Image (cartoon, rainbow, N blue to C red):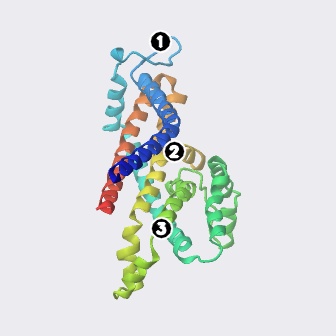
Amino acid sequence: MASNLQSAETEAVGQKTWIWQAFAMPGVVWLIVLFVVPFYAVISVAMGDIDPIFLKPQPEWNPLAWDPSAFGAVFGDLFGGQLGKIAVRTMGYVASASLLCVAIGYPVAYFVARRVEKHKALWLLALLAPFWINYLMRMLAWVNLLSPDGWVNKAIALFGFPEQNWLSGRAIVVILGLVYGYIPYFILPLYAALDRIDTQVIEAAKDLGASPRQAFLRVTAPMSKQGVLAGLVIIMLPMFGDYYTPNLLSGSPRTRMIGNQIDQFINQTTSQGGQGAALTLVLMAFVAILMVYYLINISRVTQKARE
Protein backbone atom coordinates (compact mmCIF):
# COMPACT_ATOMS: atom_id res chain seq x y z
CA MET A 1 0.00 0.00 0.00
CA ALA A 2 2.78 2.40 0.97
CA SER A 3 4.71 1.59 -2.20
CA ASN A 4 1.63 2.35 -4.30
CA LEU A 5 1.19 5.73 -2.57
CA GLN A 6 4.86 6.53 -3.10
CA SER A 7 4.73 5.63 -6.80
CA ALA A 8 1.57 7.72 -7.21
CA GLU A 9 3.26 10.72 -5.57
CA THR A 10 6.33 10.26 -7.79
CA GLU A 11 4.13 10.09 -10.88
CA ALA A 12 2.26 13.26 -9.82
CA VAL A 13 5.54 15.13 -9.29
CA GLY A 14 6.76 13.95 -12.69
CA GLN A 15 3.57 15.17 -14.35
CA LYS A 16 3.92 18.59 -12.72
CA THR A 17 7.52 18.80 -13.89
CA TRP A 18 6.53 18.03 -17.47
CA ILE A 19 3.76 20.64 -17.29
CA TRP A 20 6.20 23.39 -16.30
CA GLN A 21 8.69 22.22 -18.91
CA ALA A 22 5.96 22.42 -21.54
CA PHE A 23 5.18 26.01 -20.48
CA ALA A 24 8.86 26.94 -20.71
CA MET A 25 9.46 25.25 -24.06
CA PRO A 26 8.05 28.02 -26.35
CA GLY A 27 10.24 30.63 -24.68
CA VAL A 28 13.31 28.40 -24.85
CA VAL A 29 12.73 27.67 -28.54
CA TRP A 30 12.18 31.36 -29.23
CA LEU A 31 15.46 32.32 -27.52
CA ILE A 32 17.34 29.58 -29.37
CA VAL A 33 16.00 30.76 -32.71
CA LEU A 34 16.89 34.37 -31.91
CA PHE A 35 20.44 33.24 -31.19
CA VAL A 36 21.06 30.57 -33.80
CA VAL A 37 19.67 32.45 -36.82
CA PRO A 38 21.66 35.70 -36.29
CA PHE A 39 24.74 33.70 -35.34
CA TYR A 40 24.54 31.69 -38.55
CA ALA A 41 24.04 34.91 -40.53
CA VAL A 42 27.20 36.43 -39.02
CA ILE A 43 29.17 33.27 -39.83
CA SER A 44 27.84 33.32 -43.41
CA VAL A 45 29.00 36.92 -43.83
CA ALA A 46 32.42 36.17 -42.31
CA MET A 47 32.82 33.10 -44.54
CA GLY A 48 31.39 34.77 -47.63
CA ASP A 49 32.80 36.98 -50.36
CA ILE A 50 32.62 40.61 -51.49
CA ASP A 51 30.28 41.64 -54.28
CA PRO A 52 32.62 42.81 -57.10
CA ILE A 53 30.19 45.48 -58.30
CA PHE A 54 28.71 47.02 -55.14
CA LEU A 55 31.68 46.11 -52.90
CA LYS A 56 29.38 44.83 -50.19
CA PRO A 57 29.72 41.59 -48.21
CA GLN A 58 27.97 38.71 -49.90
CA PRO A 59 27.03 35.99 -47.36
CA GLU A 60 27.66 32.38 -48.23
CA TRP A 61 24.83 30.29 -46.82
CA ASN A 62 26.29 26.96 -47.96
CA PRO A 63 28.73 25.68 -45.32
CA LEU A 64 30.55 23.59 -47.95
CA ALA A 65 31.60 26.78 -49.77
CA TRP A 66 32.75 28.79 -46.77
CA ASP A 67 36.01 30.73 -47.14
CA PRO A 68 37.83 31.51 -43.84
CA SER A 69 40.20 34.05 -45.40
CA ALA A 70 38.54 36.90 -43.45
CA PHE A 71 39.59 35.24 -40.21
CA GLY A 72 43.17 35.06 -41.49
CA ALA A 73 43.16 38.80 -42.13
CA VAL A 74 41.67 39.51 -38.70
CA PHE A 75 44.13 37.31 -36.83
CA GLY A 76 47.04 38.72 -38.82
CA ASP A 77 46.06 42.26 -37.85
CA LEU A 78 45.18 41.20 -34.32
CA PHE A 79 48.61 39.74 -33.56
CA GLY A 80 50.77 42.08 -35.57
CA GLY A 81 48.89 45.21 -36.56
CA GLN A 82 46.76 48.10 -35.43
CA LEU A 83 43.92 45.82 -34.39
CA GLY A 84 46.14 44.26 -31.72
CA LYS A 85 46.74 47.66 -30.13
CA ILE A 86 43.01 48.34 -30.16
CA ALA A 87 42.34 44.97 -28.50
CA VAL A 88 44.87 45.67 -25.74
CA ARG A 89 43.40 49.13 -25.23
CA THR A 90 39.89 47.65 -25.02
CA MET A 91 40.94 45.13 -22.37
CA GLY A 92 42.63 47.91 -20.40
CA TYR A 93 39.54 50.11 -20.55
CA VAL A 94 37.21 47.27 -19.58
CA ALA A 95 39.48 46.12 -16.73
CA SER A 96 39.83 49.66 -15.36
CA ALA A 97 36.10 50.34 -15.62
CA SER A 98 35.27 47.00 -13.98
CA LEU A 99 37.60 47.67 -11.04
CA LEU A 100 36.05 51.10 -10.56
CA CYS A 101 32.58 49.53 -10.67
CA VAL A 102 33.62 47.15 -7.87
CA ALA A 103 35.20 49.96 -5.83
CA ILE A 104 32.15 52.20 -6.19
CA GLY A 105 29.35 49.66 -6.45
CA TYR A 106 30.25 47.33 -3.58
CA PRO A 107 29.90 49.96 -0.82
CA VAL A 108 26.61 51.14 -2.33
CA ALA A 109 25.18 47.62 -2.57
CA TYR A 110 26.47 46.75 0.91
CA PHE A 111 24.95 49.88 2.42
CA VAL A 112 21.51 49.29 0.90
CA ALA A 113 21.49 45.54 1.64
CA ARG A 114 23.01 45.44 5.13
CA ARG A 115 22.74 48.92 6.65
CA VAL A 116 19.44 50.38 5.48
CA GLU A 117 16.59 49.34 7.75
CA LYS A 118 13.90 51.86 6.89
CA HIS A 119 12.72 52.99 3.48
CA LYS A 120 14.72 50.31 1.69
CA ALA A 121 12.20 50.43 -1.15
CA LEU A 122 13.14 54.06 -1.81
CA TRP A 123 16.81 53.16 -1.98
CA LEU A 124 16.05 50.35 -4.42
CA LEU A 125 14.00 52.79 -6.46
CA ALA A 126 17.02 55.08 -6.61
CA LEU A 127 19.16 52.17 -7.85
CA LEU A 128 16.61 51.35 -10.53
CA ALA A 129 16.14 54.97 -11.65
CA PRO A 130 19.00 54.88 -14.24
CA PHE A 131 17.21 52.07 -16.07
CA TRP A 132 14.36 54.45 -16.86
CA ILE A 133 16.65 56.56 -19.04
CA ASN A 134 18.06 55.31 -22.31
CA TYR A 135 21.80 54.60 -22.27
CA LEU A 136 22.39 56.88 -25.24
CA MET A 137 20.57 59.74 -23.52
CA ARG A 138 22.71 59.32 -20.42
CA MET A 139 25.86 59.50 -22.52
CA LEU A 140 24.57 62.62 -24.28
CA ALA A 141 24.11 64.19 -20.84
CA TRP A 142 27.80 63.56 -20.22
CA VAL A 143 28.61 65.25 -23.52
CA ASN A 144 26.75 68.35 -22.37
CA LEU A 145 28.48 68.32 -18.99
CA LEU A 146 31.97 67.90 -20.49
CA SER A 147 31.60 70.29 -23.42
CA PRO A 148 33.85 73.41 -23.43
CA ASP A 149 30.97 75.52 -22.06
CA GLY A 150 29.61 72.71 -19.85
CA TRP A 151 29.16 72.60 -16.11
CA VAL A 152 32.42 70.73 -15.48
CA ASN A 153 34.55 73.50 -16.95
CA LYS A 154 32.45 76.09 -15.17
CA ALA A 155 32.99 74.30 -11.86
CA ILE A 156 36.77 73.99 -12.19
CA ALA A 157 36.99 77.62 -13.32
CA LEU A 158 35.62 78.65 -9.92
CA PHE A 159 38.74 77.15 -8.32
CA GLY A 160 41.09 78.91 -10.73
CA PHE A 161 41.86 75.91 -12.95
CA PRO A 162 42.02 76.40 -16.73
CA GLU A 163 39.26 75.00 -18.89
CA GLN A 164 39.89 71.58 -20.43
CA ASN A 165 38.77 70.00 -23.67
CA TRP A 166 37.47 66.81 -22.09
CA LEU A 167 35.99 65.41 -25.31
CA SER A 168 39.25 65.34 -27.25
CA GLY A 169 40.34 61.72 -26.86
CA ARG A 170 40.96 61.32 -23.12
CA ALA A 171 41.08 57.71 -21.95
CA ILE A 172 39.93 58.59 -18.43
CA VAL A 173 36.74 60.17 -19.80
CA VAL A 174 35.89 57.01 -21.78
CA ILE A 175 36.59 54.80 -18.75
CA LEU A 176 34.44 56.94 -16.46
CA GLY A 177 31.73 56.94 -19.11
CA LEU A 178 31.75 53.14 -19.12
CA VAL A 179 31.54 53.11 -15.33
CA TYR A 180 28.65 55.56 -15.32
CA GLY A 181 26.76 53.64 -17.99
CA TYR A 182 27.13 50.11 -16.62
CA ILE A 183 27.49 50.39 -12.84
CA PRO A 184 23.73 49.98 -12.16
CA TYR A 185 23.92 46.54 -13.80
CA PHE A 186 26.71 45.65 -11.35
CA ILE A 187 25.03 46.93 -8.20
CA LEU A 188 21.71 45.09 -8.55
CA PRO A 189 22.97 41.46 -8.65
CA LEU A 190 25.50 42.27 -5.93
CA TYR A 191 22.74 43.75 -3.79
CA ALA A 192 20.69 40.57 -4.26
CA ALA A 193 23.65 38.42 -3.16
CA LEU A 194 24.36 40.56 -0.09
CA ASP A 195 20.71 40.71 0.89
CA ARG A 196 20.48 36.89 0.89
CA ILE A 197 23.28 36.48 3.46
CA ASP A 198 21.78 35.30 6.73
CA THR A 199 22.42 37.83 9.48
CA GLN A 200 22.75 34.99 12.00
CA VAL A 201 25.87 33.73 10.20
CA ILE A 202 27.56 37.11 10.66
CA GLU A 203 26.42 37.30 14.28
CA ALA A 204 27.82 33.80 14.89
CA ALA A 205 31.20 34.95 13.59
CA LYS A 206 31.14 37.89 15.99
CA ASP A 207 30.14 35.61 18.87
CA LEU A 208 33.20 33.48 18.09
CA GLY A 209 35.43 36.52 18.57
CA ALA A 210 35.63 38.02 15.11
CA SER A 211 35.77 41.78 14.87
CA PRO A 212 33.39 43.56 12.44
CA ARG A 213 36.27 43.83 9.97
CA GLN A 214 37.14 40.12 10.29
CA ALA A 215 33.47 39.15 9.99
CA PHE A 216 33.25 41.12 6.77
CA LEU A 217 36.47 39.72 5.29
CA ARG A 218 35.86 36.09 6.32
CA VAL A 219 32.08 35.83 6.01
CA THR A 220 30.41 38.61 4.04
CA ALA A 221 33.02 39.04 1.32
CA PRO A 222 33.38 35.31 0.48
CA MET A 223 29.61 34.79 0.53
CA SER A 224 29.11 37.75 -1.82
CA LYS A 225 31.70 36.51 -4.30
CA GLN A 226 29.06 35.09 -6.63
CA GLY A 227 27.25 38.41 -6.69
CA VAL A 228 30.48 40.19 -7.63
CA LEU A 229 31.20 37.68 -10.40
CA ALA A 230 27.63 37.91 -11.70
CA GLY A 231 27.82 41.69 -11.77
CA LEU A 232 31.19 41.64 -13.52
CA VAL A 233 29.94 39.24 -16.19
CA ILE A 234 26.86 41.40 -16.79
CA ILE A 235 28.90 44.60 -17.28
CA MET A 236 32.06 43.28 -18.91
CA LEU A 237 30.40 41.42 -21.78
CA PRO A 238 28.65 44.50 -23.24
CA MET A 239 31.65 46.72 -22.45
CA PHE A 240 33.81 44.76 -24.89
CA GLY A 241 31.39 45.52 -27.72
CA ASP A 242 30.57 49.09 -26.68
CA TYR A 243 31.17 51.71 -29.35
CA TYR A 244 28.67 54.43 -28.43
CA THR A 245 30.65 55.56 -25.39
CA PRO A 246 34.01 56.13 -27.16
CA ASN A 247 32.22 57.76 -30.11
CA LEU A 248 30.27 60.22 -27.99
CA LEU A 249 32.83 60.98 -25.28
CA SER A 250 35.91 61.02 -27.50
CA GLY A 251 35.54 60.32 -31.20
CA SER A 252 39.32 60.10 -31.43
CA PRO A 253 41.34 57.18 -32.86
CA ARG A 254 43.37 57.27 -29.64
CA THR A 255 40.41 55.82 -27.71
CA ARG A 256 39.07 53.45 -30.35
CA MET A 257 37.78 50.15 -28.97
CA ILE A 258 36.96 46.80 -30.57
CA GLY A 259 33.32 47.81 -30.96
CA ASN A 260 34.37 50.92 -32.90
CA GLN A 261 36.51 48.79 -35.19
CA ILE A 262 33.64 46.40 -35.89
CA ASP A 263 31.39 49.37 -36.62
CA GLN A 264 33.96 50.77 -39.03
CA PHE A 265 34.40 47.46 -40.83
CA ILE A 266 30.67 46.95 -41.30
CA ASN A 267 29.18 50.43 -41.70
CA GLN A 268 31.98 52.71 -42.89
CA THR A 269 34.10 50.47 -45.10
CA THR A 270 31.56 48.06 -46.56
CA SER A 271 34.22 46.16 -48.50
CA GLN A 272 35.54 44.89 -45.15
CA GLY A 273 32.21 43.62 -43.88
CA GLY A 274 33.52 40.07 -43.82
CA GLN A 275 36.36 41.11 -41.55
CA GLY A 276 33.88 42.91 -39.32
CA ALA A 277 31.79 39.74 -39.02
CA ALA A 278 34.93 37.67 -38.36
CA LEU A 279 36.05 40.11 -35.67
CA THR A 280 32.58 39.87 -34.12
CA LEU A 281 32.93 36.10 -33.88
CA VAL A 282 36.43 36.39 -32.40
CA LEU A 283 35.09 38.79 -29.78
CA MET A 284 32.22 36.41 -29.05
CA ALA A 285 34.68 33.57 -28.50
CA PHE A 286 36.71 35.71 -26.12
CA VAL A 287 33.76 36.81 -23.99
CA ALA A 288 32.47 33.22 -24.04
CA ILE A 289 35.60 32.24 -22.09
CA LEU A 290 34.57 34.68 -19.34
CA MET A 291 31.06 33.25 -19.35
CA VAL A 292 32.34 29.66 -19.14
CA TYR A 293 34.55 30.57 -16.18
CA TYR A 294 31.55 32.09 -14.43
CA LEU A 295 29.35 29.07 -15.12
CA ILE A 296 32.05 26.65 -13.89
CA ASN A 297 32.43 28.70 -10.73
CA ILE A 298 28.67 28.73 -10.18
CA SER A 299 28.44 24.96 -10.67
CA ARG A 300 31.22 24.36 -8.13
CA VAL A 301 29.52 26.53 -5.54
CA THR A 302 26.17 24.82 -6.15
CA GLN A 303 27.74 21.41 -5.84
CA LYS A 304 29.42 22.34 -2.56
CA ALA A 305 26.13 23.70 -1.24
CA ARG A 306 24.40 20.39 -2.05
CA GLU A 307 27.13 18.41 -0.30
The residue indicated by pointer 2 is 242
Which tag is nearer the camera, tag 1 or tag 3?
3
**Could you say which is closer to the camera, residue 16 or residue 162?**
16
The residue indicated by pointer 3 is 196
What x and y, as percent, mark residue 171?
A: 49, 54
User: Is disc 1 surrounded by few (<14), some (14 to 19) or many (20+) residues within 10 Å?
Assistant: few
What x and y, as percent, mark residue 212?
A: 42, 84
Residue appearing at x 34%, y 47% in the figure: 292
Which of disc 3 and disc 1 is earlier in sequence?
1
Q: Is residue 282 left or right of residue 193?
A: left
Q: Is residue 295 visible?
A: yes
**Could you say which is closer to the camera, residue 302 or residue 246?**
302
**Could you say which is closer to the camera, residue 277 or residue 228?**
228
User: Is disc 3 surrounded by few (<14), some (14 to 19) or many (20+) residues within 10 Å?
Assistant: few
Which type of secondary structure does the marked residue at label 2 adopt? loop
**Could you say which is closer to the camera, residue 190 or residue 121?**
121
Residue appearing at x 51%, y 44% in the figure: 242
Q: Are the residues flagged by discs 1 and 3 in contact, CB closer than 8 Å? A: no
How far separated are the C-alphas under marks 1 and 3? 60 Å
How far separated are the C-alphas under marks 1 and 2? 31 Å
Residue appearing at x 67%, y 52% in the figure: 133
Residue 52: assigned label:
1
As drawn, the residue found furthest toward the front would be 1
Amino acid carrying mark 1 in the image: Pro
Which of disc 2 and disc 1 is earlier in sequence?
1
> Is 59 above or below relative to 252?
above
